[in-house]
Image (cartoon, rainbow, N blue to C red):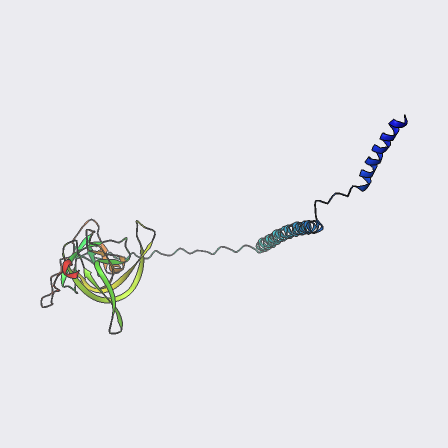
Amino acid sequence: MVKTFVPLLMISSILLSGCINRTPPTPTVSPAQLTNALTETELRLAEQMEQQCQGWQDRQQTNFDQYQLVQKGQRQLDQRLEQIENKLDTPPVQPAVITAKKPSQCPQPVAVTDSKNLGNKIVVGKDEWLWIESVNRVYEARIDTGAKTSSISALDITPFEKDGKRWVRFRLAPDDSDDSFEIEAPLVRYVKIRQASSNELDRRPVASLTVRLGKMTEVAEFTLTDRTQMSYPILLGREFLRDVAIVDVARENIQPKPAIVEGQPQLEAVSKTKKQ
């Protein structure tokens, strides 16, 4: 039995010595890492608290704005109610007595002496001949009461200055033929016109030209634009016809075709090839 106890005692001593002398385990997180982790946690918590405070302030401001709107609406309603009460307290105004008057005599109709004139106005059809003084030539013009300004077919438009005033030079191009006529005329202004096929505004110059329709000679304004693809090189709008003409759309060429002025020089035609 003693022999058995001795080995057991030795084994127990070895085990006890191993437990007593074992070193403590090394921590997995260093103090610096722990400090950084705590700092990041504090910053994250502070940021979350700041966001929550900002959200609370935004909600407070929204509620305040809504309150202000409600107060404003209430004041408007109070003012409206006060106006209605004032009207109800005001006695009604007696209606004015209307005295019947003898109807005035209708003016006598203007006597039409001929089919080309009506009083002090000329009668024009849907198409008329127009004489252009700058070239001493006659062109057929379209009468269009739907257009405000008149327009004339023009190519190679070039603004310039003459005697301190604005002028414009252009080629009067009646159609697609090779011949055209170079004209210089005073530049009145620029207008912006919206095309029917586009939403963009087209900036166009407006020139002053002396023209004759029948026996009436006028200094009129014309928008310069390319009308070579149109049926008529000239369009006469409302500004030209106003106070001087009456339109009969069922007729055409009512006024006599103006004659070329004798003794006045005519411009020579300028071909497209020469111009180029």
- Residue 64 place in picture, x, y as percent: 63, 53
- Residue 240 place in picture, x, y as percent: 25, 60
Asked whether 163 or 16 is in front, the reply is: 16
Q: Is residue 212 visible?
A: yes
- Residue with the most extreme front position: 3
- Residue with the most extreme bottom position: 163
- Residue with the most extreme left position: 262
Asked whether 177 or 233 is in front, the reply is: 177
- The image quadrant of residue 275 is bottom left
Q: Quadrant of the C terminus?
A: bottom left
Q: Quadrant of the N terminus?
A: top right
In this rendering, the count of numbered labels is 0
Residue 8 lies left or right of residue 107; in this view the side is right
- The image quadrant of residue 110 is bottom left
- Residue 62 place in picture, x, y as percent: 61, 51
Asked whether 256 or 129 is in front, the reply is: 129
Residue 191 lies left or right of residue 135; in this view the side is right
Residue 135 lies left or right of residue 151; in this view the side is left
Residue 38 lies left or right of residue 73; in this view the side is right
Q: Is residue 119 visible?
A: no
- Residue 238 place in picture, x, y as percent: 27, 57
- Residue with the most extreme top position: 1
Residue at 83% across / 37% down in the picture? 16
Residue at 18% across / 64% down in the picture? 183
Asked whether 186 or 28 is in front, the reply is: 28
